[in-house]
Image (cartoon, grey):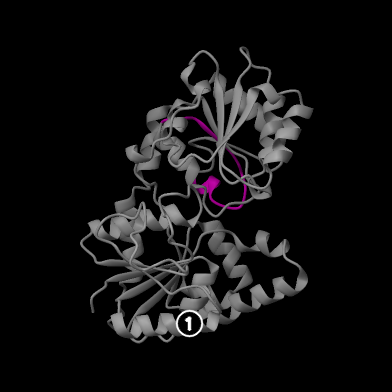
Amino acid sequence: MLTDIAILSPTGRNPGRAHGGITPVIRTLAEAFKEAGLTVELVTLTPDNPQRPIPGLPGGIKCRTLGSGHRRKQVQRLGAYLEQERPRALLAAGHRANVLAAQCPRGDTRVVLSVHNALSPGLTRLNPFRRWRRLSALRRYYPLADAIVCVSDGVATDLAHLVPAAQAKTTTVHNPVAPTDADGAAPMHPWLLDARVPVILGAGRLTAQKDFANLIRAFAALRQEPNPRLLILGEGSAREDLLRLAARLGVADRVALPGFVPNPRAHMAAASVFVLSSRWEGFGNVLLEAMSSGTPVVATDCPSGPREILAHGAFGQLVPVGDHEALSAAIDESLSLPLDAQAARMRAAAFAPAQVAGRYLDVLLYTDHA
């Protein structure tokens, strides 16, 4: 047995490149497992050259690929890998990886799935056939795992509703807050260099899930002096729609979408308020990243994660999903009466990688002595 923990991830091309989603969480966990003295290998579902080092992957962590292709082929390759390497535990991340891991012959390897987003909202957006196929896979394969980690209580409740047979195997482990990576810092946006003008910050994929249109509407309703500015970091299919909305509301000159920023922590620290405007989330790591910088936060009370992170509003304001007037009022209040920065930092510290990795290891390396 050469590997303690194998992590099956949907992609491995550049774990340091993506911000948000599964990739940075996996990178942070892998590094924390390694620092705990365990051997870790990242197994990916990409056609990458397995001999080529992956940028952003911490040193000392092995990597191999199962290659792309039909699911049956990948199951066979994963089975061969487990038979050859015999890791103590396999942690799968994301639905495709979860399905492969759950149906794979595993020998003595403990197989743990991880669910990083509420599944119901995504299912409702699929056509009836794809929804039936996805739900069938959930109900057929997820109960076969040894354990399932959900990143929030809301995600766990959602999974239990969809897959009742998996409920007894499910536990909640919140995501870690990745440490600041100074090497990944991007040049600061010029607006953040002028402390005289408040800057509201959002970050994430420019998609319907993040509902940045609601944030722009809330921003347009602000009546602060001097007029604040809005930065939204990220890329996605909604970019042009968001720019058109800002123009229609007369705030285009005070809204900027500068694109992807590999490590936005410096931007968060310089912003006046960070806002998460999502319709749904799995957890909402960006909230914790902003809080670790001491920046006031406002979030929609979406399913799921923000309410758990903010302790029902004790560490930041929660507003109804899609209510731009309530969001605008909360931003206005946060600009006028920001919460204690030190309290926010202390709350974020509860999600430090070493602590979260320890909770994962309790699940991954659990043995039944009965």
Question: In the image, is residue 13 part of the stretch drawn in magenta?
Answer: no
Residue at the spot of label 1: 75
* Dot 1 amino acid type: Val
**Image spot of residue 323 (x, y percent):** 72, 38
Q: Residue at x 54, y 46 (%)?
A: 307
Q: Is residue 317 above or below residue 140?
A: above
Asked if residue 310 can be seen in this view, the reply is: no
Q: Residue 53 versus residue 17: which sits nearer the camera?
A: 53
The stretch drawn in magenta includes residue 303: yes
Image coordinates of residue 82 in percent, x first then y, are 35, 81
Q: Residue at x 52, y 52 (%)?
A: 283
Q: Is residue 42 above or below residue 308?
A: below
Q: Nearer the viewer, residue 76 or 273?
A: 76
Question: How many numbered circles does the render carry?
Answer: 1
Q: Toward the viewer: 301 or 95?
A: 95
Q: Give the position of the N terminus as an image quadrant.
A: bottom left
In the figure, 266 relative to 155: above or below?
above
Q: Which residues are magenta?
A: 294-310
